[in-house]
Amino acid sequence: MEKAKKYFLYARKSSESEDRQMASIDSQINELNVLAKRNGLNVVEIFSESFSAKAPGRVEYRKMISRITNGEADGILCWKLNRLARNPIDGGEISWLLQNGNIKHIQTHGGSYYPTDNVIVMAVELGMANQFIRDLSTDTKRGLKSKAERGWYPAGAPLGYTHNPLKRKGDKEIIIDEARFDLVRKAFDLMLSGQHRPNEIRKIAYKNWGLTAKNGRIISRSGIYNMFNSPFYYGEFEYPAGSGDWHKGHHQPMITQEEFAIIRKLLGDKSISRANKYEFKYRGPIFCGECGCMITAEHKIKRQKNGNIHKYIYYHCTKKKADINCLQESIEEKDLEQQISGIMGKIEIPAEFCNWAKGVLKEQNRHEVVGRVQVLRNQRIAYDGVLKKLDAIIDMRANSELSESEFVSKKASLSIEKDRLHKIINNTDERVGDWLETAEKFFNFTELVKERFDNGDSDTKKSILLALGSHLYLKDKKVSIELTKPLQLIEKCSDKVGKIHSRLEPPKNVDIQGFYAEKYASNPVLLRG
């Protein structure tokens, strides 16, 4: 039997379940070098890679085979035969090279293979390796489908969410990402306002809020569109993709289904019917209060006997749900618009109150600076504590006080905590002061909002309506809307401010701002708000 003269050492490991029990690449190389020295095998080069062998295409493996066929080596040293092949193409190639004598010897940790051996033995081992991959694929697909049926999205967590690190792989539930969830919701709010396009929103989120994709970079153009088009955010998902199998998720929704429908409308969803010639101001964000279908609009023309022609726009339920009999009647656009203007009147505030309220809030923010500094100091102490623990386990590993598996486990846990605290520290100052920015935004929005709505063009009217809140319904020819929480507070303030302005008129030659500021400050309801 001709003995091989030169050996290539090949080490491989991947994330497959059986491979996770395999020794690490460094351990494989160390053990195989000992084996080579003991058996007098001449190892001329080492090839290693972290890649699955379930399909052809491994880079280092192909380099090794190419150099063997060129005669640079005639033997292979590997941990097990399944390190070389787990698919029939690579397995057949190894068998053929061995039978032809291109490879004169394959030495593993547990056996040897020569050209003169019974080929059936090697074929069985390679076949078992291939069958493992086939079974693994079937079991994985079955497991992912079962997970979806239990209400858990069996894929990567979308932006704003993360996997529960306390659960083992395969059972990890999707939970909110504390560092990103609120920021992603802010992005949805900007989209719902109707005043920004997705590409603008991703830039604002990155520059002003520090919101990044999970790779730490700005969200890509396709990424922001995929986010706004994903039903996952209102609590549903399709799995497998394109299968038509929809599942109700157990994760915490970020938006409502109504808000999702509004966004799809704003993005130009082709599945939502559009007029061929007209773009109606209030079609899209309003839903029927009886059946939940979308409110649509149409033109109607009335011709009088005297020749006069009158054009009207009517809004009515689409009545697209076949299983219900919606009895809601249509409403003329001018009546609908008058009701919406009335809602604006309930939250409108004069410029004097807006200036006074923002001044009070800024003063409160200055008082909170001391507390904010203490919060940041405590967070940095916790962060420094984690860094010390990481340094300690590195020293313990160097002194062999921790096994490799213990070190990897502890390092992974501490690294997660370090990243979490780092994000909190970076976002704390912004988040603590974020209430001030939000309050100022809503005060600016409500300042003379009714006047801006009544005198605005179609786009202005629609954008103002979309910014009011969610759950905008039309029932019995009456419009109702659930205002956002800040606007609910401003609505209470607006009522009190309106009474102050209607009851009191400042004397001539008096500072109007100062006169009303004194009245606002003496009202306990306004101060609480």
Image: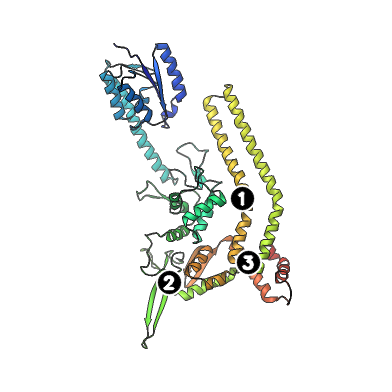
Q: Secondary structure at mark 2?
A: strand
Q: Secondary structure at mark 1?
A: helix
Q: Quadrant of the C terminus?
A: bottom right
Specify whether 488 is left or right of 511.
Answer: left
| Residue depicted at x 62% and y 55% | 435
Residue situated in front as seen by the camera: 296 or 170: 296
Distance from label 2 to label 3 (Cα)? 30 Å
- Sequence-wise, which precedes: disc 2 or disc 3? 2
Tag 2 residue:
315
Numbered circle sitting on residue 430 = 1
Residue situated in front as seen by the camera: 268 or 342: 268
Q: Position of residue 40 (x, y in %)?
A: 40, 11
Q: For the residue carrying disc 3, how many other residues have a C-alpha within 10 Å: few (<14), some (14-19), or many (20+)? A: some
| Residue depicted at x 42% and y 18% | 32
Q: Amino acid at mark 2?
A: Tyr
Distance from label 3 to label 1 (Cα)? 28 Å
Numbered circle sitting on residue 194 = none
The image quadrant that residue 49 belongs to is: top left
Q: Position of residue 501 (x, y in %)?
A: 67, 74
Tag 3 residue:
492
